[in-house]
Image (tube, rainbow, N blue to C red):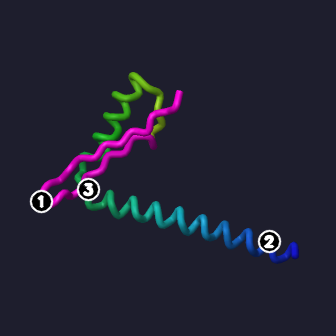
Amino acid sequence: MGLFDFLKAKKNTAETAKNRLQIIIAQERSARGGPDYLPLMRRELLEVIKKYVNVDIDAVRVDVIKDGSHDVLDISVALPEN
């Protein structure tokens, strides 16, 4: 039974790695079509937010979403619970 548990654990690890890779690829694809100013805007927003709240760099997300014929700037900030 121990041998089968070992094989099962590898499958879960491989599945987790596969899911993480899919997320990274999706993020890269969405960033490729985005405007060039988004990374700079994200850094500047993070600097301003850090003046008031201690947040991680991954807490700020800036995306451009198509809404019909308009582009909408979507800014999301995950604030700490404290």
Instruction: Tell me the residue at 53%/27% (across/down).
Output: 82
Position of residue 79 in the picture relative to residue 11 (left or right): left
Q: Which residue corresponds to the image point at 85% horizontal and 76% vertical from the top-left?
A: 3
Residue 69 position, x and y percent, is 12, 59
Q: Please tell me in which quadrant of the rendered image residue 45 appears.
A: top left
- Disc 1 is placed on an element classified as loop
Left or right: residue 27 compared with residue 16: left
Residue type at the position of mark 3: Gly
User: Residue 42: image x %, image y %?
Assistant: 33, 41
Residue closest to the eye, 40 or 60: 60
Nearer the observer: mark 2 or 3; the answer is 2
Marks 1 and 2, how far apart at CA:
53 Å
Q: Please state which amino acid type lies under the numbered disc 1.
A: Ser
Q: Along the polypeptide, which appears first: circle 2 or circle 3? A: 2
The numbered dot on residue 69 is 1
Residue 6 badge? 2
Predominant SS along the magenta part: strand
**SS for callout 3:** loop
Residue pictured at 44% horizontal, 40% vertical: 59
Does the magenta-highlighted stretch encompass residue 67? yes
Residue beneath label 3, please?
A: 34
SS at mark 2 in the image: helix
Q: Measured along the vertical axis of the image, is residue 33 above or below residue 49?
A: below
Q: Which range of residues does the magenta coloring cover? A: 58-82
Residue 60's quadrant in the figure? top left
Which is closer to the viewer, label 1 or label 2?
Answer: 1
